[in-house]
Amino acid sequence: MQENKKIAVENLNLYYGEHQALIDINVDLKEQKITALIGPSGCGKSTFLRVLNRMNDLIDGVRIAGKVTVDGEDIYDNNMDVVSLRKKVGMVFQRPNPFPMSIYDNIAYGPRIHGIKKKQVLDELVERSLQQSALWDEVKDRLNKPALGLSGGQQQRLCIARLLAVEPDVLLMDEPTSALDPISTLKVEELIHELKNTYTIVIVTHNMQQAARVSDYTAYFLTGELVEFDHTEQIFTRPRDQRTEDYITGRFG
Amino acid sequence: MTIMSSTRQTYDKALEDLQREILRLGSLVEAAIDEAVHSLAKQDAKLAQRVIDGDEAIDNLKREIEDKCMILIATQQPIAKDLRRIGTAFGIITDLERMGDHATDIAKITLRLANEPLIKPLIDIPRMAKLAQNMVRSVLDSYVNADIELAQKACSKDDEIDHLYRQVFDELLEIMQRDPRTVVQGTHLLLVARYLERIADHATNIGEGVLYLETGERKDLNL
Ligand SMILES: Nc1ncnc2c1ncn2[C@@H]1O[C@H](COP(=O)(O)OP(=O)(O)OP(=O)(O)O)[C@@H](O)[C@H]1O
Ligand SMILES: [Mg+2]
């Protein structure tokens, strides 16, 4: 299968005030592939993820140089519509953060904002999103119950469903399973695997085995630099850079 | 081995133990080959029997090491070079165990031939044996010392062994053609040469394993 680049990052540099958090990043992220971002705490993984849908815009004092394109479109162009960018490139966070409303309303929230009002259309969207996130069977009889009554693993899948409901292309996930037990983790990983057929996924994880299990590509970041980017198989059997080897095998520090 | 670091002592210690065990298996096998060929040349049935009896210890140790590898995989989820180290270990112990089997095969032939005069003085066969033993010793050294040059050099000796094998083969064939009464013993001696040639092949596999372990590259050293 041909691998198209979905996201292209060129000469990216990012500063939080004086502090440079990303240094000369160049990387292409492939369409319908899963890319895992790994690296020690503070190396810039979350920052990089937020670059991809301009979430850093919300932080004071951030300065970005370089070029980031999604589907060939420069997302930092002045004409870029940030709202539609964030619809296209959606994010799931470390801690599940359902809204304090019903399961149904959580999912319908995004589509409603984007102008969908018809009950029938919303019903379909809610069901489809919950099916896709492998949660439907567990919640179909309690759609009007509060989302906060779900387990942590269910809440995370709900957040993924909420994201899918606005029909994005790219899913950014920042440590999506770090708060989940092993079974919920595996469910979410399975789900991520399924979603790959439709979406381009970028996932931050501190769990090396998770990166190895779910991703097609792995990017190793160290103090703001992208040290190594390659097929996951390559990274986990014979990384080219000694620093990558030291990190993934736990010899770091 | 240069794998000690402060962050993962238990794991590193287990890997070092693993390597030590593999070397122990290696020396058992080296000794078995040496004694097997010796027993044949000296027609020493007692020595041959010792080789045969010793094979069980080799098999047991091999299985023990295999279990250790399995446990390491289950408990440490090895990746990168650690993974190559354990993957290579499986290969090395299988090759060593096979060599041990061939030593036993040779010892069994010693028992068969112990009470009859040899149809020819054994010259090339001990030479093959010496070369094969050197290969085994060198690839194991290359393994311990992470010395890929030595691994490659050792494996290049395989040609000489192949050459000697062909020489032994032709010579024995000729003897057997001249005098059909030599066929039984001649065939057994042919098998001995064949086993030694196989031992060298297994040593080559180990050399390739060392190369893969150290570099991540797959290369055929048996050209
Ligand atoms: N809002 C902010 N303001 C200033 N500095 C920040 C901000 N967010 C992150 N940083 C700094 O930028 C660097 C990269 O942080 P980032 O959160 O991207 O790391 P990370 O790789 O995601 O770490 P972790 O694995 O701990 O989540 C760190 O030095 C961090 O202190
Ligand atoms: Mg982070």
Image (tube, coloured by chain):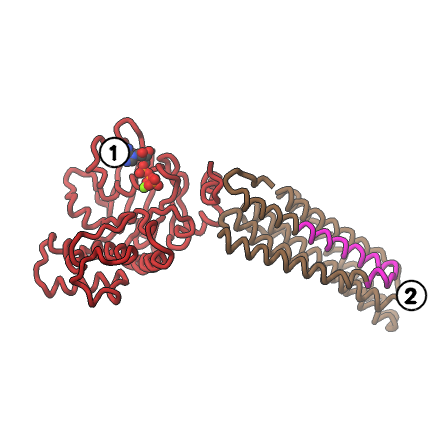
How crowded pointer 1 is (Cα within 10 Å; few <14, some 14-19, many 20+) is rated as some
Q: CA distance from mark 2 to mark 1?
A: 89 Å
Q: Which residues are magenta?
A: B22-49
Is residue A45 visible in the rendered image? The answer is no
Single out the residue that lies furthest toward the top.
Answer: A18
Kind of residue at disc 1: Ile
Horizontal and vertical percent position of residue A207 = 40, 48
- Chain at tag 2: B
Q: Determine whether the residue tagged by mark 2 lies in a helix, strand or loop.
A: loop
Q: Is mark 2 within 8 Å of ligand 1?
A: no
| Visual hue assigned to chain A | red
In the rendered structure, find residue A64 and report the number of the disc placed on it.
Answer: 1
Kind of residue at disc 2: Pro
> Magenta stretch: dominant SS?
helix
Q: Looking at this view, is B74 or B152 the one in front? A: B74
Q: Nearer the viewer, mark 2 or mark 1?
A: 1
**Picture quarter with ligand 1:** top left
Q: Is residue B39 magenta?
A: yes
The number of callouts visible is 2
